Amino acid sequence: MARRPEKNPPLVIYASVDRSGTTYSLSERTRHVIREKFGDAVRLHSRIFVSDETSADYEQLRGPMREQVIQLLTGLSESRLKELGVVEFRNPASDEAVA
């Protein structure tokens, strides 16, 4: 019986929300996978913070900021990262996916 090719686990960006904004960071596994594939060609940032003036800002910016957050953390576009797997944003406390 032929084995099915294994799907790459998702690349994880943690999104930690508090009353003043959201801190985004790469999981350790994601940092390792990116470094393994791209080496010194990328400059990874440990975390970035996006301030929200109001809760409405948070709701409006969450989706549209996705690509910018990925580029700021990794120096790569989401389409480039998809070579390694799907990018997921997760809550660091629960490890559940967030929008």
Image (tube, rainbow, N blue to C red):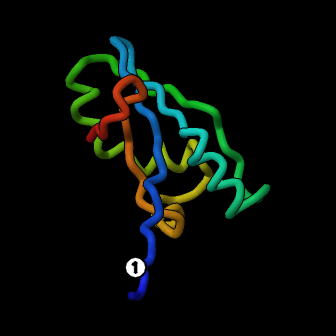
Please say if 57 is above or below 77: above
Residue 11 location (% of width, % of height): 48, 51
Looking at the rendered image, the quarter that the N terminus falls into is bottom left
Quadrant for residue 63, please give it.
top left
**Residue nearer the viewer, 1 or 63:** 1
Please say if 88 is above or below 79: above
Residue at the farthest bottom position: 1
Q: Which residue is mark 1?
A: 4
Residue 72 location (% of width, % of height): 56, 43
Residue at the spot 30% in from the left edge and 40% down from the top edge: 97
Residue at the farthest top position: 19
Please say if 89 is above or below 48: below
Residue at the farthest front position: 1
Residue 98 location (% of width, % of height): 29, 38
Looking at the rendered image, the quarter that the C terminus falls into is top left
**Residue nearer the viewer, 50 or 83:** 83
Quadrant for residue 86, please give it.
bottom left
| Amino acid type, residue under disc 1 in the picture | Arg
Residue at the spot 47% in from the left edge and 63% down from the top edge: 8
**Residue nearer the viewer, 31 or 52:** 31
Judged left or right of residue 22, residue 53 is: left
